[in-house]
Image: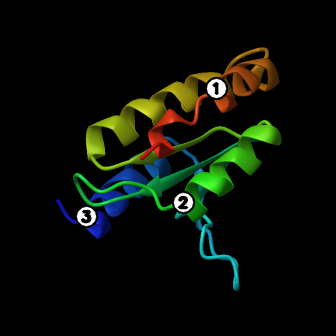
Amino acid sequence: MREDIIETAGVKYAINRRWTVYKWSSPGNRGIHDRLHIKKSVVFSIEYKATGKKASPKQRAEAVKLKAAGIPCRCFDNVQDARDFINIMTEIAGSDSPILDMAVLSNDIRSFDP
């Protein structure tokens, strides 16, 4: 499946769950992830890829930076995995201790591995 189709479906799903979703761009920084999601002080990013494609080394480096800042991020090449992660983050946004939950999730950046 093409990246734009996966991204569009993921964004629509997140918006339907009341996330504010931004197309994330940073001139001069090619590794920045596709989308930034914000809800109730919870923030996470998603890098979307076409089915079977992997994150670039620069995108993985960005994931390492976000991990260090305690921001969960994932790279997805299919709609269902993106939806599953958005559901997890939606639960965290409604929890009593979102910062602790986000810190735990931010430690996992395996989805950016080659």
On-image quarter of the N terminus: bottom left
**Disc 1: which residue:** 105
Quick one: 61 or 13, which is closer to the camera? Answer: 61
Q: Residue 71: percent from the left, percent from the top? A: 73, 41
Name the mark on residue 57. Answer: 2
The amino acid type of the residue labelled 3 equals: Ile
Residue occupying image coordinates x 76% and y 25%: 103
Between disc 2 and disc 3, whose residue precedes?
A: 3
Question: In this orientation, does residue 60 appear?
Answer: yes
Q: State the CA–CA distance, disc 1 to disc 3.
A: 26 Å
Whether residue 104 sits left or right of residue 80 in the image: it is right
Mark 2 or 3, which is nearer the eye? 2
The amino acid type of the residue labelled 1 equals: Leu
- Relative to 101, does residue 62 appear above or below in the rendering? below
Between disc 1 and disc 3, whose residue precedes?
A: 3
Q: For residue 106, what is the image quadrant? A: top right
Question: In this orientation, does residue 40 appear?
Answer: no
Q: State the CA–CA distance, disc 1 to disc 2.
A: 21 Å
